[in-house]
Image (cartoon, rainbow, N blue to C red):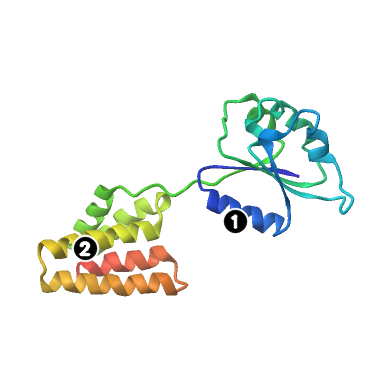
Amino acid sequence: MIRVFYGDDRVKATAEVRRILGDEYEVIEGAEITRAELPSVLMGATLFSEKRKILIRDLLSNTGVRDEVAKFVDTPHEVILLESKLDKRAAVYKELKDKVEFFEFKAASAVEFSAVFDVYRVAKRDGARAVLKLRELEPHEDPVMFFGLLVSQALKDFTARPGAQEKKVLKMLAQVDVQMKSSKIEPWLLVEGAVMRLGSL
């Protein structure tokens, strides 16, 4: 079986490689494979095992062999192609897309400061409305990163006006921060709870 992993989040991709292949697998640099070597790489057995676990880096970027990969989709081995870039317009992608599994590992986008500021500003007056705004952002953002920017906004407020309310906000956010690091509660639920409480402090 061949799987293709691609995208800019190499940490998640590598974790999934280990989950599927385990701790012991062959690692092959796809750029160094020749057309003559490809059949033995994808189909050949070893002295120790008939079924191999193989990670091949950037094979589909190797213009000398990538057009041959489709011939070996029935490999008996567990093969993962880890690609730095994947051109979905390329002929090799079109040939493989219905024959092998593709998995994209996309890093969470950087949260726009204006979006965080907007949620924070609305939360100070109306927590429920701020949570609705937050839920629009959740599918596209990372909760830990978002919460960190929320805290930085609260710190700016405290620096500009170190009043009792600003101090309460920071104290509450610090408690939520501890929960996020130690609790098994879904992080977005904790962020939503913090946003909801902002207006009542």
- Residue 154: give x, y in percent of width and height: 21, 63
Q: Amino acid at mark 1?
A: Ala
Where is residue 74 shown, x and y percent of the image? 80, 39
Residue positioned most to the front? 32
| 63, above or below 176, in the image | above
Q: Earlier in the sequence, mark 1 or mark 2?
A: 1
Which image quadrant is residue 43 in?
top right
- Disc 1 from disc 2: Cα separation: 34 Å
What label does residue 141 carry, if any?
A: none
* Figure quadrant of the C terminus: bottom left
Residue in the picture at 38% in, 60% down: 144
- In front: 199, or 59? 59
Q: Are the residues at dot 1 and dot 2 in contact (C-beta closer than 8 Å)?
A: no
Q: Which quarter of the image is occupied by the N terminus?
A: top right
What residue is rendered at 29% in x and 72% in y?
Answer: 174
Q: Is residue 98 above or below residue 148?
A: above
Residue 98 drawn at (x, y percent): 69, 35
SS of the residue under disc 1: helix
Seen in the image, is 199 located left or right of residue 149? left
- The residue that mark 2 highlights is 154
Indicate whether 124 appears above or below 44: below
Residue 10 visible, this angle: yes
- The disc placed on residue 15 is 1
